[in-house]
């Protein structure tokens, strides 16, 4: 009796995904390239398969591509530091995740401008999967920056005053809203512009108590008393007068330098009021293992405010990954609306 032994070949099905990659630092619209790659059908041991849903274009992303941001991924790298996705599969040995979970990058440099990715479980962080798409996409950077600066440097009580420059920035808008929620008074300083009255009205609708121009700040026309915390993201002369308005034992937190000028501080208040100057970088806070439980608590509180309508997410221009060139150009040149890749 003849027998036949067939040779059976088991083929694996690969997943095709689109992503935005840069192989060298440079001008983002030119450095970023669109590519299609394949992923294994199953994540490796200790890895999680994430379907990325939405990711913004932030200034830090652009600086990273240009090569001037402190976080420098090994090249070639997928762009994007912020965004959220949904867990599709989990590899062997993975704990703390389940299919359907929504996740954020655990820290900067993961690369979120992609449709799918297989990531180590310690590179991801679970969030509430009932939050709106836009809020989830930007939950990692601006709201937490505002939250931590209001929580970590001064023991603020209801009625205390927070003074900030760059009052129209994304972080500043969250500062205004969180101050309103927690009962703090907020004073915001903005650049003079043609539509100043409209901007003042807009910021006050978010909860700002007072809005002044940089010129009014520098000419000391701000008469507000009891300023315990100043938030500086401009530097230069603006930081000088911001610090000058602090009361005794006040703190100025610097988290940006849009003027590209050194932080300045008046000598008198530094000596006689014992004011303090500190720096803050949200990415470093995320890198500290002791902050994991506090991170869960922070996201839970921010999520509660978002779902209650107390914390509003800014307007976005939603873009396809294939429109990356124009999206990046707009991200560099348009500041009234953030660009958001939706995959």
Image: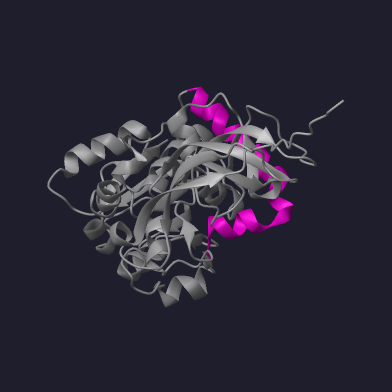
Q: Which residues are magenta?
A: 279-308
Residue at the location (41% across, 52% down)?
A: 163
| In this view, 246 is above or below 156 | below
Q: Please give left or right for residue 300 compared with residue 279 in the image.
A: right
The residue sitting at the right extreme is 1
Q: In the image shown, does 140 or 234 lie closer to the viewer?
A: 140
Residue 31: x, y in percent?
34, 62
> Is 305 in the magenta?
yes
Q: Quadrant of the C terminus?
A: top left
Residue sitting nearer the eye, 33 or 264: 33
Residue 191: percent from left, percent from top: 23, 54
Q: Answer yes or no: is residue 247 visible.
A: no
User: At which x and y percent is residue 336?
Assistant: 25, 43
- Residue at left offset 61%, top offset 43%: 40
Hey, which quadrant is residue 165 in on the image? bottom left
How many numbered badges does the structure rendering display? 0
Can you say which quadrant of the picture contains the N terminus? top right
Q: Is 155 in front, or is 104?
A: 104
Task: Look at the magenta stretch and give its main secondary structure.
Answer: helix
In this view, the residue farthest toward the left is 194
- How far across and down, in percent of the image, does residue 81 sit? 49, 51
Left-right relation of 205 to 10: left
Does the magenta segment cover residue 288?
yes
């Amino acid at each position: 009796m003849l027998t036949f032994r067939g040779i059976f070949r088991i083929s694996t099905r690969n997943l095709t995904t689109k992503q935005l990659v840069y192989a060298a630092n440079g001008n983002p619209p030119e450095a970023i390239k669109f590519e299609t790659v394949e992923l294994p059908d199953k994540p490796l041991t200790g890895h999680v398969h994430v379907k990325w849903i939405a990711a913004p274009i932030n200034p830090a992303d652009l600086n990273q591509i240009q090569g001037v941001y402190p976080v420098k991924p090994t090249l070639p790298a997928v762009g994007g530091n912020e965004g959220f996705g949904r867990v599709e599969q989990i590899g062997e040995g993975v704990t703390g995740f389940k299919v359907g979970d929504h996740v954020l990058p655990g820290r900067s440099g993961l690369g979120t401008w992609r449709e799918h990715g297989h990531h180590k479980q310690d590179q991801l962080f679970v969030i509430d999967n009932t939050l709106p798409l836009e809020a989830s996409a930007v939950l990692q950077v601006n709201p937490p920056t505002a939250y931590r600066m209001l929580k970590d440097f001064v023991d603020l009580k209801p009625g205390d005053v927070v003074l900030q420059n760059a009052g129209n920035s994304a972080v500043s808008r969250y500062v205004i809203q969180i101050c309103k929620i927690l009962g703090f008074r907020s004073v915001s300083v903005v650049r003079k512009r043609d539509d100043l009255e409209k901007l003042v009205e807009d910021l006050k609708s978010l909860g700002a108590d007072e809005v002044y121009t940089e010129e009014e700040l520098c000419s000391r026309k701000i008469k507000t008393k009891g300023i315990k915390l100043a938030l500086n993201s401009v530097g230069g002369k603006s930081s000088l007068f911001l610090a000058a308005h602090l009361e005794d034992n006040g703190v100025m937190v610097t988290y940006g330098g849009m003027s590209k000028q050194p932080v300045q501080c008046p000598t008198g208040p530094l000596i006689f009021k014992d004011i303090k100057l500190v720096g803050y970088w949200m990415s470093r806070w995320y890198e500290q293992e002791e902050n994991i439980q506090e991170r869960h608590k922070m996201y839970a509180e921010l999520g509660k405010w978002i779902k209650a309508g107390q914390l509003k997410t800014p307007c976005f221009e939603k873009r396809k990954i294939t429109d990356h060139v124009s999206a990046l150009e707009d991200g560099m040149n348009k500041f009234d609306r953030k660009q958001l890749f939706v995959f």
